[in-house]
Amino acid sequence: MSDIPAKGKNYLALLAHPRCGAHARTTGKPCRCPAMANGRCKLHGGKSPGAPRGTKNGNFRHGQRTQEAAERRREVRELLQTLRETMAGLKRR
């Protein structure tokens, strides 16, 4: 490998790197770009983590549909279900 020019060494390292794997709609062939840490290339979702959460997002209006609000609603729903089951058990006595 010592006789390969510096450009060739980088090329071999690039060939050994994992590929993106996203498929084209028309041809069905996989993307040949090198993948980033999440398994996709920068063109297919590897670079951006998504929109910021909360008030940092310019489209933020209220907190009704945040993950925290959904978790709170889930907890209340479970608590109500437990209370209903308890009440039903007390009525049977």
Image (cartoon, helix red, strand yellow):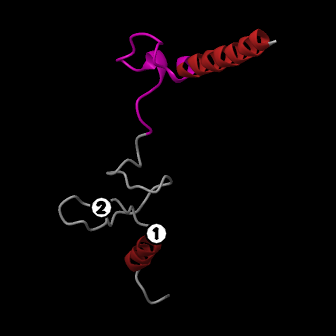
Question: Residue at point 39% right, 79% down?
Answer: 8
Question: Residue at point 37% right, 63% down?
Answer: 21
Mark 1 lies on residue: 17
User: Along the horizontal axis of the image, is 91 left or right of 75?
Assistant: right
Task: Say few, some or many: other residues with alpha carbon within 10 Å of mark 1 (under 14 / 14 to 19 / 20 or more).
Answer: few
Question: Residue at point 41% right, 66% down?
Answer: 19
Task: From the top left corner, tell me how far across and down residue 74 is, in percent.
Answer: 59, 21
Distance between the alpha carbons at the discs numbered 2 and 1: 18 Å
Determine contact: label 2, label 1, CB under 8 Å: no
- What amino acid type should be assigned to the residue bearing mark 2? His
Please state the total of marks drawn on the protein image. 2
Q: Is residue 58 magenta?
A: yes
**Boundaries of the magenta span:** 49-69
Q: Is residue 83 above or below residue 23?
A: above
Looking at this view, is 60 or 67 the one in front? 67
In which image quadrant can residue 68 be found? top right
- What amino acid type should be assigned to the residue bearing mark 1? His
Q: Counting residues from the N terminus, which is met first, the one under dot 2 or under dot 1?
A: 1
Looking at this view, is 27 or 84 the one in front? 84
Q: Give the structural element (helix, strand or loop) at label 2.
A: loop
Mark 2 lies on residue: 23
User: Along the horizontal axis of the image, is 42 left or right of 3?
Assistant: left
Q: Give the structural element (helix, strand or loop) at label 1.
A: loop
Task: From the top left corner, tell me how far across and down residue 18 is, in percent.
Answer: 46, 67
Task: From the top left corner, tell me how far across and down residue 78 is, in percent.
Answer: 65, 21
Q: Main secondary structure of the magenta part?
A: loop
